Amino acid sequence: MVHHEHDYAIKHALVYTDGALVPDATVVVHQGVITYVGRHDEALVGDLKQFDAKGNLVGPGLVDMHLHGSGGFDSTRGNIQENLEGLALFLEKKGITAFQLAVVMDLDLLVQIKKALDKSPFLASHMLGVYVEGPFIALEKKGGILPSGIRAYDRAYLDAILAIRRGAKPLVTMMTIAPELPHSEELSTILEEHDIVVAYGHSDCPLQELKPRGKYHLTHLFNAMSGIDHKRPGLSAMPFVSDYRGATYELVCDSLHVHPSVIDMTISTLGTTRLCLISDAMSLAGMGPGEGLYLGKKMYSTGKACYYSDSDTLIGSATLITESAKMLYQEGLLDKQSFFRIASENPLRVLSQTDSGFVRVGYKADLVMLSDAMDVQEVFKAE
């Protein structure tokens, strides 16, 4: 069940807070903000509505920083505002209280998304921004992106993207680029000046050709990028190399985008301090096997991943992060602390979000209650 309460308390919870698990704790919320975390104090709880966690785990709501759609909702057709509000409601029920919408570059679509956010405070409280894959990427690593969504660097076109703004900032919060393409350094610098996260991906760049930068982030590690080769290491090798020890990276863990043994290798070797769990989910995610459309083309879902019908090209996942994080936990690759680290804390850190992602005083009360098997029991969403 999803709760949109403003003032309440959760008691008898196993609370994940500041990297630790605190048993039999109480969380107090006023006006959607956490005001207390600790031993039960009846004076603090007062007449607030109380929820008994009965020992269940309470942590920050999950965050998917790379998601195209799910539950039958996406942003590629129909009424954009209704679709995105429907998407937010669907994700809430799965314990995902915030998301960054991933899209293929389309200026008209960006304008429509901006209008939807301006008109809907509900949507704005769930959606962290827009993650654009392209258009300045490598054609040979396009993955499920159609050629029409790819172009050479064009400063005028970039300016048109940046001109679509919400308040003082661009609507776009992240952009995938191929660093081997001409003018990629100029592009990266301009994006960073506008507080847009630069993500390397859809690229065939050899690792040795990368120019030094202060920050590195990888779009869906291993997928649609140069691989780990013992003579020509590509972007996939970046997180494993000491020169890039600060690089953050996304990983799709539906067992089809990346082989389970490679997921195991990555987490076992690198740990979880830089890993951002993503779904890369399409509109059919969370609905079992079925058929649909993406960018005007027919696609189908196996229940785990989505493919173009005419070519069987893998284009996205049908597995939400709630499911993939639970799977990693059950396989022993995550504990309860790292579950929240990769599915909430790390994505928000990459996006420089500082008001949520922790069960901590002063933070937004986007919370999820999970059973011992990591199944969603209750969701608390601050509006």
Image (cartoon, rainbow, N blue to C red):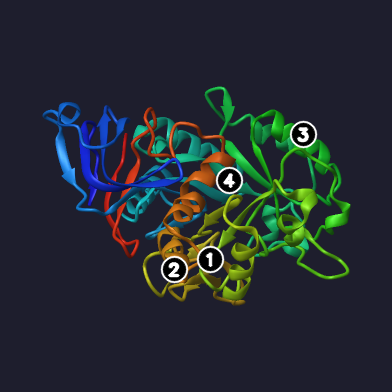
Q: Secondary structure at mark 1?
A: loop
Secondary element type, mark 3: helix
Which mark lies nearer to you, 2 or 1? 2
* Along the line of sight, the residue nearer the viewer: 373 or 143: 373
Left or right: 96 as drawn, with respect to 264:
left
Nearer the observer: mark 2 or 3; the answer is 2
Q: Position of residue 93 (x, y in %)?
A: 30, 53
Residue at which label 3 appears: 189
Q: Does the residue at mark 4 contact the one at mark 2 (Cβ under 8 Å)?
A: no
Residue in view at x 74 percent, y 48 percent: 136
Mark sitting earlier along the chain (2/1):
1
| Percent of width and height locating residue 120 | 37, 34
Q: Which residue is mark 4?
A: 131
Tag nearer the camera, 4 or 2 = 2
Q: Is residue 255 left or right of residue 180?
A: left
Identify the image quadrant of the C terminus.
Answer: top left
Which type of secondary structure does the marked residue at label 2 adopt? helix
Residue located beneath label 2 in the image: 327
Residue type pointed to by label 4: Tyr
Q: Is residue 125 shown to the viewer in this render?
A: yes
Determine if residue 64 is in view.
Answer: no
Q: Look at the picture and state if 312 lies above or below 41.
A: below
**Distance (Cα) linking label 2 and label 3:** 38 Å
Q: Secondary structure at mark 4?
A: strand
For the view shown, which residue lies furthest in the left direction? Answer: 47
Please say if the residues under marks 2 and 1 sit with CB atoms less than 8 Å apart.
Answer: yes
Q: Name which of mark 4 and mark 1 comes first in the sequence.
A: 4
Q: Sequence-wise, which precedes: disc 2 or disc 3?
A: 3
Q: Which residue is mark 1?
A: 253
